[in-house]
Image: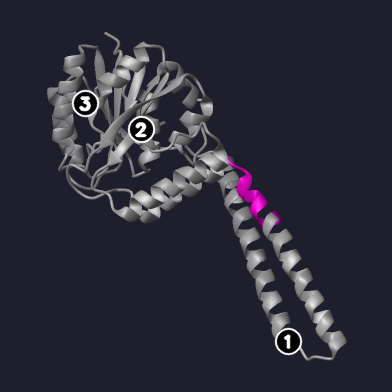
Amino acid sequence: MKPTLSLIIPCYNEEESIQETHRRVTKVMEDLAFPYEVVYVNDGSRDGTAELLNAIQAEDKAVRLIHFAANRGHQVAVTAGLDYAQGEAAVILDADLQDPPEVIPEMVQKWQEGYQVVYGQRRSRQGESKFKLWTASAYYKLMQKLVGKNFHRDTGDFRLVDRRVVDAIKQMPEHARYLRGMFSWIGFKQAPVLYDRDKRFAGETHYPLKKMLKLAIDGIISFSDKPLFIPILLGILLGGVSGIGLLALLVRLILGLQSGLWWLAAWVTMLFALLFMVIGIEGRYIDRIYREVQGRPLYFVAETRGFDTPSEEK
């Protein structure tokens, strides 16, 4: 029987939480009484996650496994789950239980009402530092200004998407994946479900500050050309300041006052700083073009289990 719902759960070094995740997911889905499948994507885990997933799949025929040949990152792992999912709708959630599976029935209800994207919107975030909360708030405000109101605040990848949405995402092959932005960009009928985000069940976050910054930059570059205008605005600002400076130097010259070479050194330094900034911004976009032109596969699959037709690469 074809599944009605596909649950997509990317995993990277989740041996401490994966069994509890599966227990809670199974209970929620059995209570819903829909035909379902659970697609676990092992993103090159280095601990015992792969062995635990194999054992879970051997006991539960609703489980499908995708083992990556190497770590490719959270966004690519979710993409692989969407590629392999067979359900009429797919639910994306992480294995760390910060996004509680118990919210899924409310998402399903919204889907049955006709919404094609039902995104989890955080009402509160437990176990996160004030710095993390502040930077997250600032980032979502910035993205709404750059991308527009279609970018939803306080949301992650936790959401339910209709089969039509899954098929639309599969037509977007870009390598720098920013799925929450992609889901917002494609449109369709969307609605939020408010929930309280929990602490990680076990282990440490796989999104430290460095990875969060990379994801944020990917999102900005992928969905906005407004950063390209920053050098133009800085050039106008610097031109105005330089004009005032030159006028001041002219006045000092008329008055017979000595200015020395300090002003020249300052202007040269500012001009070089502006030049490096322009080169850096252009470099990011050129790098994005280069990666897309390469045309490499997003991922390679070492093994699949539970699917009708095993596949080794995608």
Closer to the camera: disc 3 or disc 2? 2
Residue at position x 44%, y 22% from top? 190
Q: Is residue 62 above or below residue 72?
A: above
Residue at position x 45%, y 47% from top? 139
Given residues 214 and 140, the one toward you in this image is 140
Point out residue 119 in the picture as x, y percentages from the top left corner. Answer: 38, 28
Q: Is residue 307 above or below residue 212?
A: above
Residue furthest to the top: 1
Residue hosting label 2: 121
Residue hosting label 3: 102
Given residues 140 and 66, the one toward you in this image is 140
How packed mark 1 is, by other alpha carbons closer than 10 Å (few <14, some 14-19, many 20 or more), is: few
Residue hosting label 1: 261
Q: Sequence-wise, which precedes: disc 3 or disc 2? A: 3
Query: Visible in this render: residue 172?
Result: no
Given residues 189 and 49, the one toward you in this image is 189
Residue 225 magenta: yes
Q: Are marks 2 and 1 in contact (CB under 8 Å)?
A: no
Residue at position x 53%, y 45% from top? 220
Residue type beneath disc 1? Leu
Q: On the rendered image, what quadrant is the N terminus found in?
A: top left
Tell me where residue 276 sits by quadrant.
bottom right
Lateral position of residue 2 relative to residue 232, left or right: left
How packed mark 2 is, by other alpha carbons closer than 10 Å (few <14, some 14-19, many 20 or more), is: many
Residue furthest to the front: 255
Which secondary structure, mark 2?
strand
Q: Sequence-wise, which precedes: disc 2 or disc 1? A: 2
Q: Main secondary structure of the magenta part?
A: helix
Q: Are marks 3 and 2 in contact (CB under 8 Å)?
A: no
**Magenta span of residues:** 224-232
Which secondary structure, mark 1?
loop
Compute the Cα span from label 3 to label 1.
68 Å
